[in-house]
Amino acid sequence: MPKDHGIGASPKRREDVRFLTGNGKYTDDINAPNQTYVYFVRSDVAHGTINKIDTSDAEKMPGVVRIFTGADFEGVGGVPCGWQVTDRFGEPMQEPAHPVLAQGKVRHVGDPIVAVVAETLEQARDAAEVLEVDITELPAVIDMKEALKEGAPKVHDDLTSNLCYDWGFVEENREAVDEAIKNAAHVTTLELRNNRLVANPMEPRVAIGEYDASNDEYTLYTTSQNPHVIRLLMGAFVLGIPEHKLRVVSPDVGGGFGTKIFHYAEEAFCTFAAKAINRPVKWTSSRSEAFMSDAHGRDHVTKIELALDKDNNFLAVRTDTYANMGAYLSTFAPSVPTWLHGTLMAGNYTTPLIYVNVKAVFTNTVPVDAYRGAGRPEASFQLERVIDKAARELGVDPIALRRQNFIKPDQFPYATPVAVEYDTGNYDATMDKIEEIADLAGFEARKAESAKNGKLRGLGIAHYIEACGIAPSNLVGQLGARAGLYESATVRVNATGSISVMTGSHSHGQGHETAFPQVIAEMIGIDESQIDIVHGDTAKIPMGMGTYGSRSLAVGGSAMVKAAEKVIAKAKKIAAHLLEAGEDDIELANGEFTVAGTDKSVAWGDVTLAAYVPHNYPLEDLEPGLEETAFYDPANFTYPSGAYACEVEVDPETGKVEVCSFAAADDFGNIINPMIVDGQVHGGIAQGIGQALLENCVYDSDGQLLSGSYMDYTMPRADDLPNYTVDHSCQTPCTHNPLGVKGCGEAGAIGSPPAVINAVVDALSDYGITHIDMPATPARVWEAIQAAK
Amino acid sequence: MELEGSRIIAADRQTVWEALNTVEVLQASIPGCKEMTGNAADGFEAVVTQKIGPVKATFKGAVTLTDIVEAESYRIVGEGKGGAAGFAKGGALVRLADAEGGTELIYTVEAKVGGKLAQLGSRVVSGVAKKLADQFFENFEMAVAPPEEEEEETADAEEKPKKGWFRKLTGKNT
């Protein structure tokens, strides 16, 4: 019988009541009295020198309040990067300046040049139309390998080249890996592209800057996944505002997927301009603007080699990756192809030797940063693809090949050759589960049935691992992070026993308002309705690091548990006083404190009342009140893993791929709310299928963004997706966080692209096709079939 | 985007050449051209309103003629800025050759769009360019081809251009 409350229950998401009834309060729903609107004039060339900006006619246009250019930001800090990668020669990465508004040059289509602030958005746009911006277009670099060639145009004149860094990991293994590959009985090589994606959250970005001159205080409302990070970066590095004078609020946020982690120029602009004109300044991104200003995702070009011995044991993995940084370094961009990618190249396998080389490259394109999975999908994709290719080349079953090389349950904790230690896992269990729930035994019959209808059916398996719960601060500090990655929570118990939890985690679709109270309800034994979650406002919550990397429950939830434990410990002291018993004899269950072995008890609400009305209270030993804060810094990453199975039908006449079925058997450790976990996996798989079959961000050779709207950038729609079979009954709880949870937000997007492409390649294997790049559109599949015929 | 084509214009080579160098003819021939000033030697300034895919914009820009070989060929190069809509730029090599029934006009067009036009309209640019080229030459033919004899002067004559109006303009009515 499933539980109806607490940990393991699936209450409906309480936040959905407001989301589904149009009562969510998003940033764009906020309007400040006397606010102005800003319209950004953005570069329409990928690379160019700004000769002249003439604002004189525009300034005379109706409603114009003020027009800002790069000149207004001289002496103001640039948009900072939050992670410094050290290259394989021990040198720091090349780090270009990133001005709020372009200064002297523009470096990608969409680079903001001029900001027109007016009484209405329409007036700002009209004034922008009469502005004169004279730009001499310069040759642009779009292709990464071209960008690294001698004599290529430089994105940043003051850098030595377009190479951000050349990273090797583990550098000491380099020669041993080369040697192993040279001497191996079999080497499988695969070259692939991990396609550039646009995150496309349903809600575009919005920012409102406010300035209170009488108190010299700033407020920024913004669509952020981590308001404290924005406060830190913008306050300290861009505008020089001390934190106590800067409040950042991220109210309801309509999806982030990583792209709302980062600090953007528009946020800094609105805050800066609010003071300059002493009026609130609002910016709402249009969808077109989002395509050319939200950080993009992925965009890796990779060659991977897998070496096996004569018995098909994995000996070594070597990968060479070119990672597109775009024109500037977005907040966490350098970490994505390195520490979030290289450290996962062991996958679920006992491969003893691994070497990962990554060249991060500047190009005249929108900056690229973390997108759902961030580095881990790129690792999983290449590994699971090359293993499939190896199985085909060796004529062995791809599942058997994986099983043979799996890390076994008795090998945990398992230290990989790429610097991480997996605490728990049972990969055979998830593989067993996928064989069962995806009915792999019945595949041949389904394939025969498809063939009768003229369709080619393919089966694809992938087994992913990811590192979540980002991250141990001392470790990431060594790796170049310029921030700590702990999380915080305050558990405030009110006098009558209800509870407000102020969490540093941020919910932008994850359902924290439902899942977090389940944990507190379980710990204390009160109803979830007595517990509320407060998040997204630096004025209300302790300094928190926000939500990304599937970290909220593992790190933020753990902080909340630690704070709740402190609350319970204090409440037990109060209860001991009230019950005239020893503190050690007090037990808490079902909202009642009892003295062990007796029938003496006092209710949760009586204890909390005593804390705030301390008439009968041990004041000499204990402070009144019941509110505790905890900061939790994880000891390790968490390592969710899982087996995914995808079946597709390919129409050989048209090249159209239909996903017939998709099954996921994930190990997320303990589960708080199974329904929310299902939803997270569903969403991740939808985005993974989107990447594998539909989505592609394309630039032409001049750097014009060709897929800049939904006419050309294909988002997955309901009829592109099957019903999913999702299972998370395989559970090896995390050993180092108090909830034993691992995180589930990104898994779907990590495990699904290789499963889909493995299925497509399987369907096309009779043609001798061994690889097809994402997205496997009908045109690409059809062309591959024609070329193979 | 590249585009090639040719047309037979029912007029002699000199007439076609002169028309290709006459601002009124070019203005009348360029689809959506609202204004055009200047001359062949110094270049032209033009204002053109066009719809490319979902983007409608007014482009202001300069057009210059280079590589001029009298009565034989020139290269026409231009760039138009459409404000928030982005820009369009390109060039065409235009060559003339004697042909049965008049003059053959051979063109090779190269065009690029940028900004919002590329973001939203790049998929349809080739189709639009083909259509615009066809319209240009229809208009051009209308201007320079000999007038049709049965055509009568009517009350609404001034409202639409008559075939062969360029000849009337230049006095060459043969």
Image: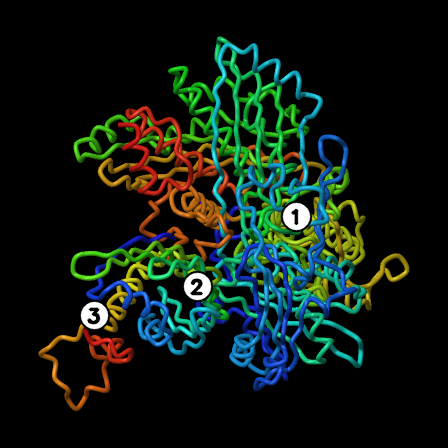
Residue extending furthest bottom?
A: B155
Chain ID at mark 3: B
| Labels 1 and 3 within one chain | no
Q: Is there CB contact under 8 Å for labels 3 and 2?
A: no
Q: Characterize the local packing of mark 3: few (<14), some (14-19) or many (20 or more) Cα atoms within 10 angstroms.
A: many
Q: Left of A533 or right of it: where is A75?
A: right
Q: Residue B26, image x and y in percent? A: 35, 71
For label 3, the SS is loop
Q: Residue at x 71, y 70 (%)?
A: A272
Q: Kindly report which numbered mark, 2 or 1, lies closer to the viewer in this rendering.
A: 2
Name the residue carrying label 3. Answer: B145
Q: Nearer the viewer, residue B132 or A749?
A: B132
For label 2, the SS is strand
| Residue A517 in view, yes or no | no
Disc 3/disc 2 C-alpha distance (Å): 23 Å
Q: Residue B159, image x and y in percent? A: 23, 85
Q: Residue at x 57, y 84 (%)?
A: A61
Name the residue carrying label 2. Answer: B65
Q: Quadrant of residue B118?
A: bottom left
Name the residue carrying label 1. Answer: A332
Q: Is there CB contact under 8 Å for labels 2 and 1?
A: no
The amino acid type found where label 2 is placed reads Leu
- Going from N to C along the chain, the mark reached first, 3 or 2, is 2
Q: Kindly report which numbered mark, 1 or 3, lies closer to the viewer in this rendering.
A: 3
Disc 2/disc 1 C-alpha distance (Å): 50 Å
Q: Residue A697, image x and y in percent? A: 46, 49
Q: Quarter holding the C terminus of chain B?
A: bottom left
Q: Left of A99 or right of it: where is A28?
A: left
Q: Nearer the viewer, residue A74 or A571?
A: A74
Q: Nearer the viewer, residue A765 or A348?
A: A765
Q: Characterize the local packing of mark 1: few (<14), some (14-19) or many (20 or more) Cα atoms within 10 angstroms.
A: many
Chain ID at mark 2: B
